Amino acid sequence: MITSIVMALVIVAVAGVAYVAGNRFGRKSTEGLVAQAEELAARLLEDARREADNIAKEAELKAKDAALEAKEAAEGELKEKKREIQVQEKRIQQKEEHLDKKAVLVDQKEMDLLKKEQTVSTKEQTLSAKEEELAKAASEQRARLEQISGMTAEEAKNSLIETMESEARHDAAKRIKLIEEEAKETADKKAKEIIAAAIQRYAGEYVSEKCVSVVPLPSDEMKGRIIGREGRNIRALEAATGIDLIIDDTPEAVILSGFNPVRREVARLSLEKLLADGRIHPGRIEEVVAKSEEEVEKAIKEAGEQAAFDLGVHGIHPEVLKLIGRLKYRTSYTQNVYQHSLEVAFLCGIMAAELGINVKQAKRAGLLHDLGKAVDHEVEGSHAVIGADLARKYGESPKIVHAIAAHHEDEKPSTILAVLVQAADALSGARPGARREMMESYVKRLEDLERIATSFNGVSGSFAIQAGREIRVMVSSDQVSDEQSVLLARDIAKKIESEMTYPGMIKVNVIRETRATEFAR
């Protein structure tokens, strides 16, 4: 192919040369030039053929070399693959030998297992026979024991259970005693330190208030003016305030009677203003009562704000502050609830600081714990539940709400804060002189304490002391052991908790003594 191309090129060249020469030299010299051109073309053609042959030979040689190299490479790869196949065959052979060995071992183990199963089966048969013999012997022995002891197996079982129960109660009582003693060594000391510090760091003034208020008169002549013509003045005053006016033989005094302390305060202020002004008639009474109500509402608001300011508690809803202020005119067991709430708040804060918890949160819970008493005469339910509902309504946190609800066990205390409020409330109420009761309720509480204590077996006598804050229980030494006395004290305390209502705590003291008496004759 290369030769054909070269020849074509030569012919084209010769033709071009002849054409040029013919044009230039004319027809005469054309034939000579053509002959030269043909000769030149023949030489060029020959050279081209030789060169083409050389190129073809070189290409053939290169092709043979490449083929040889490819053959050698293919043979090398084949040898390598053969080597790899031989290695794999060797590995497979080794694995087969290993598997054969394992198969032999497995067969051997199967034989061993069969032998062991046969041995176990034989032993099971032997054991079954022995168990039957033992069961028979046990039955015979049980019958002999029942015959000898005069008790059936069930009776002996019950006797054993009773003995074990008695021993368990004995051990439990001893354990309880040890645990209580260990706990008292640490807990009582720390608790007393915290309570003592709280009491010493806070002292509050108390105002004893009753369900009546007494308004002094400049003279007995004012009684007639207060009553008015045909009693119209006193009726107008009672209608406007909702408080009963008692005008009796008490010299120079009018008694205001009512269970609502806020209304009673409004009536007292109104009457004092009327007496000072001297103008007493229905129109004037209504005007003065309206002004007094405004003053009392203002005082209530200021009292709530002052309480929050004194405690450093902020962010309380205005309606809640008003309810706190209303507590200033509310009493419980003759203890002023406003002052009681402040004291509980301070005690909670002090104890919280000792325990390392949030002081402001503790003060807040203490201040709001009796919030329900501000409206408990208007809403049904215990004051703890009412207070918790009010606190929840006005955006107090769940911890505060729970502490309010749990301070009288309406809910089981589940946080340290709730327990703190409960302890501070009891501490404030139990302080000597903080609360005063009527003689009848006081005597009844003492009688109930002694009745509960003497209702238990083994109690020979009981004595309520320290104004009902402690009961001493005397037990018979031949009926109650030292360990049983620990359990008896706990049982009495639990029964008192379930059957009685009381402020603070009641200490149960069980006393057991053994006396040996002999006479020398």
Image (cartoon, rainbow, N blue to C red):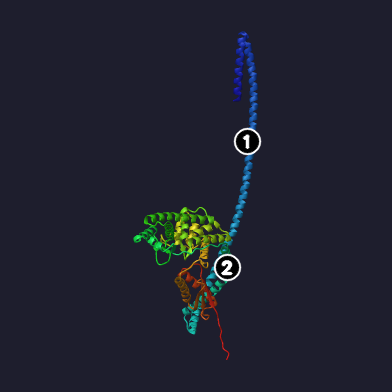
Q: Earlier in the sequence, mark 1 or mark 2?
A: 1
Q: Residue furthest left?
A: 230
Q: Is residue 4 above or below residue 468?
A: above
Is disc 1 in contact with disc 2, using a CB cutoff of under 8 Å?
no
Q: Circle 2: is it few (<14), some (14-19), or many (20+) Cα within 10 Å?
A: few
- Residue at x-position 54% and y-position 68%: 117
Q: Can residue 168 be seen here?
A: no
Q: To which residue does mark 2 refer?
A: 188
Location of the C terminus by quadrant is bottom right
Tell me the kind of residue under disc 1.
Ala
Dividing the picture into quadrants, the one containing residue 350 is bottom right
Query: Percent x, y for residue 498?
Result: 46, 69
Q: Can residue 520 be seen here?
A: yes
Disc marking residue 67: 1
Q: Secondary structure at mark 1?
A: helix
Q: Is residue 62 above or below residue 464?
A: above
Dividing the picture into quadrants, the one containing residue 226 is bottom left
How far apart marks 1 and 2 lie (CA) works out to 106 Å
Q: Circle 1: is it few (<14), some (14-19), or many (20+) Cα within 10 Å?
A: few
Which is more toward the observer, 11 or 508? 508
- Residue at x-position 62% and y-position 46%: 82
